[in-house]
Amino acid sequence: MSKAGVFAMALEQLESAAKRLKISDSTLRVLSHPERELTVSCPVVMDDGRIEVFTGHRVQHSNARGPCKGGIRFHQSVTLDEVKALAMWMTWKCAVVNIPYGGGKGGVQVDVTKLSKEEIRRLTRRYTVSIMPIIGPHKDIPAPDVGTNAETMGWIMDTVSMFQGSTVLDIVTGKSIDLGGSLGRREATGRGVMFNTLELLKRLDMQPCRTKVAVQGFGNVGSVSADLLHRQGCRILAVSDVTGAYYHPDGLPIPDMIEYCKTTRHNVLDGFSAPGVSKIDMNDIFGLDVDVFVPAALEKQITIDNVDKIKARAIIEGANGPTSPDAERVLLKKGKYVVPDILANSGGVVVSYFEWVQSIQSFFWDEEEVNKNLQNVIVRSFEAVWKVAQEEKTDLRNAAMMIAVKRVAQAVEERGIFP
Ligand code: NAD
C-alpha cells in the first residue's frame, strides 16, 4: 500500500485539532514544521566484502515539553516523509499521556530479512554514529520500532558509550534487562493496547469474555496485544503477519503461536498449524465478523478501498497511523469507535519514560510497580480523552489531539520564539 502523504495525513489531523482549539496561525505554523531533519548515508561492509550504502533519517519534531523521544524503524519502505509523520505523532503521544518529552523518530531504509545479524549490527553502529551529534539522554532518546528490538538498542547504547568513554544507559530505552532496561518495557505497548481496549469495552457495556478480536501484525505490539487480550478472556479469532493470516472460529491458541514464532528465523508465523486453524487471505482480516480490530503492523492499512469491509465496532490503533483520514470518516459515520494511535499505543513510550527515569537514578522498579503505574497513566489518559470527546461532541482522535496539541502549543507560547 502506498505510503505517499503520511506526513500530509499527520498535518490534516493537527489542523483539525488546531481549528477546534482556535490555536493562532503563528503557533500552528511552528507546530506544522519538524524542528530538525537529518538524513545520513551509512556505508556498510557486507559479509561478502561488498560495500552497501543505506539511507537513514532522524527527525525531531518538537522539544517544547522535553527531550525528543521516539523509535528507530528498520524497514524497506522507510522514507523521510514517513519519519516526519511518525516524529510528529510522537510529540502528540507524549503530550496526551502527559510525560515530559517531545517527539522524534528515526528510520533506515533496509530489508533486515536480507541481512545477516553481523551486517545489521554494523549498520546499526554506523547509523548511530551518523546521528550521534543530535541524540543524547537530554536531547533525543531513541527506542525500538518496526524491525528493531532490545538487541539493537544495546548496540546503540554500546556505540555511544565507546565514544563517551563511559556507559551511557539513558541514551536509549527498550534495552534488555541486563543492560539497564525496565521490566515490563517489551510488553508495554501491547499492555497499553489491552488497557485501552478494556476501558472502551467498559464504556460500551461489552464483556471481554464475549468479545471477538482480530489483530493485524504479530510482532512486538500485535503478539503482546493478542496475548494479553486473550488472557483477559477475549477470543482472538484471527491474527496476521507479513507471511499470512490465521483464523480459528472459536479463538486461536495465541500462546502456542508466540512460542512457534520464537523457533523461526525472523519471528514469523509462516508454517504454523494447529487443529481448527486455517490460513486465510491476508486481506480477509479486515472483513471478519469481530467486535474489535487491532491494526498493529504499519500505517495506512485501513483505507477508503477496504474500509467498507470492516465489521468491528471498535478499532484500537496498535500501529501508528493505520487509518487514513477519509477511511476514519467512514468508520465514524457508521458509529464505530477508533481509539487513536497516540493513545492506544502510548504504553511503549510511557514505560520508556519509566525506563529513562530508572536509568538516570540507577534505581530499578519491580514489574508490578511498572505495570501498575502504566495502568494508572493509561486509565487516566483514556478518561480525559473520553470526557473531552463527550463535552466537545467529537471523536476520540480529535479529543486526544485537542488535549495534546493544547499542551504543546501552550509550551511553545510560554517559552516564546528564540531569539
Ligand atoms: P515489529 O517489527 O515487531 O512487528 C511488525 C509486525 O507487522 C510483524 O509481525 C510483521 O510481519 C507485520 N506486518 C508487516 N506488514 C504486514 C502486513 N501488510 N500485514 C500483516 N502484517 C504485517 O513492529 P512493532 O514494534 O510491533 O510495531 C508495529 C506498529 O506499532 C508500528 O506501527 C510501530 O510504529 C507501532 N508502535 C510500536 C511500538 C513499540 O514499542 N514497539 C510502540 C508504539 C507504536
Image: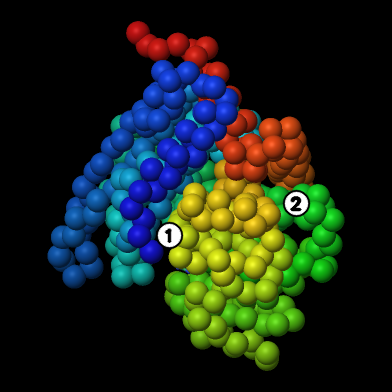
- Looking at the image, is 52 positioned above or below residue 86? below
- Residue 29 found in image quarter: top left
Pick whichever, 313 or 208, lies toward us: 313
Is residue 150 visible in the rendered image? The answer is no
**Seen in the image, is 141 located left or right of residue 314?**
left
Q: How many marks?
A: 2
The CA distance from mark 2 to mark 1 is 30 Å
Residue on which disc 1 sits:
147
Where's the C terminus, which quadrant? top left
Q: Residue at x 65, y 43 (%)?
A: 396
Labelled disc at residue 56: none
Q: Residue furthest left?
A: 50
Task: Give SS at disc 1.
Answer: loop
- Looking at the image, is 255 positioned above or below residue 72? below
The amino acid at mark 2 is Leu
**Seen in the image, is 356 located left or right of residue 120?**
right
Q: Residue furthest top?
A: 419
Few, some or many residues within 10 Å of mark 2 (<14, 14–19, 20+):
many
